[in-house]
Amino acid sequence: MSGMRPTGRLHIGHYFGALTNWLAFQNKYDAFYSIVDWHALTTKYQNTAEISQNVIEVALDWLSVGLNPEQSTIYVQSAVRETAELHLLLSMYTPQNWVERDPTLKDMVKMLAANHEEALEKVSYGLLGYPVLMSADILGPKANLVPVGRDQEAHLEFTRDLVRRFNHFFNVDYFPEPKPEFTEIPVLKGVDGQKMGKSYQNDIKLADTEEDTIKKVKQMVTDRTRIAKSDPGHVDLCEVPWPMYGIFGKNISSQVKTECESAAIGCVDCKTRLGKLINEFLRPIREKRNKLAKNPEEVIKILEYGNIKAKKVTQQTVIDVYEIMGLRYWKN
Ligand code: SF4
């Protein structure tokens, strides 16, 4: 099980950092992929205008890269209201200091507020409960595996602790302890050499036009010591284009290295060539996306199909949890 917040169109960092692994997992596992719109509210509760459209944008990106609704359960978090019910039930078993020390939450608070006073004003009850909601996302379909990078292992530890506490408390072996499925995540820098991110406006989006992609690639930071075209370049000092050649132009990387180090090619031409390679790679994804985008009703139908599948599974989990807790599950 994994999810993404609907904060906008996805970029190539999402593709290589998460989606390629998700594609592999859907062939191996019964995969659940959720567009987590409630999570978007934890930090964007004052600015909700774009969330609904962004759900569709993320769905378009997922479907155009090849996530298959027949293989994976692709759904919207808020459509499976049983997840909120599970969140509430789990919250009763979550010690307050667990949520306060959660590393993900600490990062989000830092992002949201510059100081303690601001944090008191801006950090909502919903944000504090973020790790419990994330646990409900994972435990709703009783997921065994969650794809994470090695640096994110701690994020999952919260859910594992909560599972152990719940199972121990009721003396059951009901929830599986979700294990991290480690994925090798290549670090893709944005065009300015910083971490690639939507909010930094340094990303190359899956949905960008070819012209925009070329324009962005031309802004990439290269070898800062190379001043004139006649200066030999150093691929090791080339901040963005050279690592990108490692992804989009592996077969010509030795040629690029030779041309760079002998000053046979200037950075502008080198980046134009890279831009074309990126466009070639993304072309089939973009063609599929453009076709799907013309028919948003079809995308909504695909999501509704996934919503029903996810709801069925999560509803059963909630019924079981009521029973384990010794409460009556009232049908409505
Ligand atoms: Fe980087 Fe290419 Fe310029 Fe060499 S020629 S520094 S690889 S952009």
Image (tube, rainbow, N blue to C red):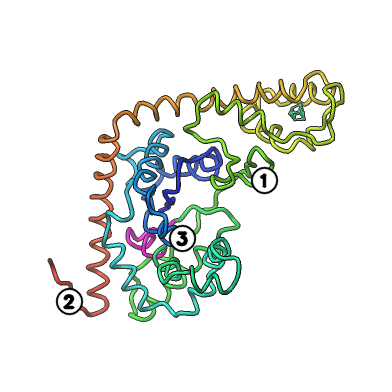
Q: Which mark is residue 328?
A: 2
Instruction: Tell me the element at label 1.
Output: loop
Tag 2: amino acid: Arg
Would you place residue 50 above or below residue 279 in this image?
Answer: below
The answer to whether residue 283 shows anywhere in this view is yes
Tell me the residue at 69%/42% (across/down): 193
Residue nearest the viewer, comparing 147 with 109: 109
Residue nearest the viewer, comparing 21 with 294: 294
Looking at marks 2 and 1 on the same chain, the residue that comes earlier in the sequence is marked by: 1
Alpha-carbon distance for marks 2 and 1? 53 Å
Tag 3: amino acid: Thr
Q: Position of residue 98 (x, y in %)?
A: 49, 76
Picture quadrant where residue 312 is located: bottom left
Magenta span contains residue 158: no
Q: Which mark is residue 43?
A: 3
Q: Nearer the viewer, mark 1 or mark 3?
A: 3
Picture quadrant where residue 143 is located: bottom left
Mark 2: give few (<14), some (14-19) or many (20+) Cα within 10 Å.
few
Tag 1 residue = 194
Instruction: Tell me the element at label 2.
Output: loop
Relative to residue 38, is residue 182 drawn left or right? right
* Region of the chain picked out in magenta, as a range: 135-145
Judge: label 1 CB < 8 Å from ligand 1.
no
Relative to residue 2, is residue 321 drawn left or right? left
Tell me the residue at 81%/18% (across/down): 264
Q: Nearer the viewer, mark 2 or mark 3?
A: 3
Tell me the residue at 79%/37% (across/down): 236
